[in-house]
Amino acid sequence: MLALFPESAALDGADLTLGGLSSESLAEEHGTPLVVLCEETLRANARALREAVGDGRVFFGTKALPSVALLRLLREEGIGADVASAGELAFAEAAGHGGETLVVHGNNKSTGFLRKAASIGAPVVLDASDEAELAAAAGVEQVLVRVTLGVDADTHEAIRTGHHGSKFGLPPDQARAAVADALDRGLDVLGVHVHVGSQLEDFDAQAETIVRLAAFVAGCRDELGWTARVADLGGGFGIRHHPDDHVPDAAELARGAASTARLAFVEAGLPKPEVWLEPGRCLVGRAGVTLYRVGTVKRLPERTWVAIDGGMSDNPRPQLYRARYTALSATRADEQPGETVSVAGMHCESGDVLIDDVALPTPRRGDLLAVPATGAYTLAMASNYNGVARPAAVLVRDGSARVIRRRETIDDLLRTELG
Ligand SMILES: Cc1ncc(COP(=O)(O)O)c(C=O)c1O
């Protein structure tokens, strides 16, 4: 079970400690739900991915967790940022990123967003047939073209993106036309982009995509006399959320993706590309643990509900993708499981269930639950459903905790109300 938790997680008798601090002391000081991020794990993940791409580049998929402190920490480790909205771009700028260390995404970029990208010299990934025109008009100089090569990744359909009919990217004929259009408009077309899907648990879909990508670029060379200097392979490497999950190490997958791309391009008679990757989840997912306080425990003939003080407003992934989590009793970790229970959120939806079944020491009001592998796409997707304020996040290391996102207050929620 501890293997799902960050590197600094340990058991001190009954207590789960994170970054050298007891979970209970973190919960008491900062309240719950609380997202605890382990700095040691973040830096180790960043270094492993950087090493895996060799002379390529790594951009953090900011959507996984837009946090200025996190972006700054990753920047210290040589990681750029992939941003998909003006808001994410503002987070990245606040963390010290400029054009050189950014890559700009979005399947429907606003003119303002394109102008902002142009003003700081960030490369833009074209995602639609008329976007070369819009990008050129906004003053963008460097672009890539996102191509969908018809590969169905073995992942939940909501996070599959490289198939034909996807709302992202362009199929090969339209992508080739977009390259030609961008060249005609005097844009520097750096290369091509693919993102097969997220939470990939093997390398098959990516390997097939990379082979098709090399063939696509070879076709562009033959027809347009242009070839890609950059192969941006997107993100998507999965992580383990549950003891039953089997997912290869992300750095190994990244190393495989980079070397497969270099080989596929050379075999297609193309120059070796500079490989870019845009990992999100595998950089921050395992670094994060969410702490919840147990409230009502309801024992019914059908099942036992353990209600926590959060739920779909801080982690909607079970509802969006049927994501499966587990939990540890953070203050009674030395006790044997006494009951298999369901962990319910506090929201007015029957579907607001964080965990369907988990064996815990017989739960009681006041227990502290720790849910591992919750650093990615949780706070990033948090909402104010039921007027619930979004949680705080702390970065822990060597016995100290730094608040990197303060807890929202009800006054924050009322601040945007008028009339
Ligand atoms: C273009 C692009 N790059 C990177 C990512 C990050 O993916 P992941 O968090 O699965 O690594 C995404 C996720 O949706 C994406 O769409």
Image (cartoon, rainbow, N blue to C red):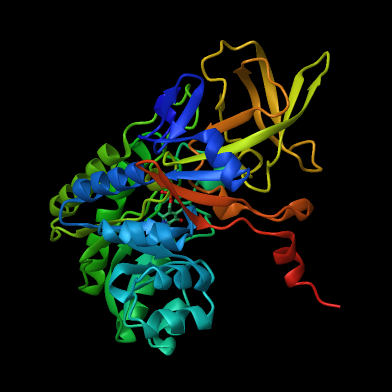
Q: Is residue 320 left or right of residue 119?
A: right
Q: Residue at x 49, y 43 (%)?
A: 36
- Quick one: 242 or 167, which is closer to the camera? 242
Residue appearing at x 29%, y 58% in the figure:
79
Residue ID at (61%, 55%): 407
Which one is in front, 324 or 188? Answer: 324
211 is higher (above) or lower (below) than 184: above
Q: Is residue 81 above or below residue 340?
A: below
Q: Which picture quadrant has residue 121?
A: bottom left
In the image, residue 246 lies at what x, y percent? Answer: 41, 26
Q: Position of residue 414 (x, y in %)?
A: 77, 67
> Residue 145 location, x and y as percent?
36, 67
| Image quadrant in which the C terminus is located | bottom right
Image quarter of residue 358 = top right
Residue plotted at (51% across, 73% down) = 86
What is the total number of numbered labels drawn onto the structure image?
A: 0
Q: Is residue 207 above or below residue 371?
A: below
* Quadrant assignment for the N terminus: top left
Residue 104 placement, left or right of 217: right
Left/right of residue 365 with respect to residue 209 in the rendered view: right
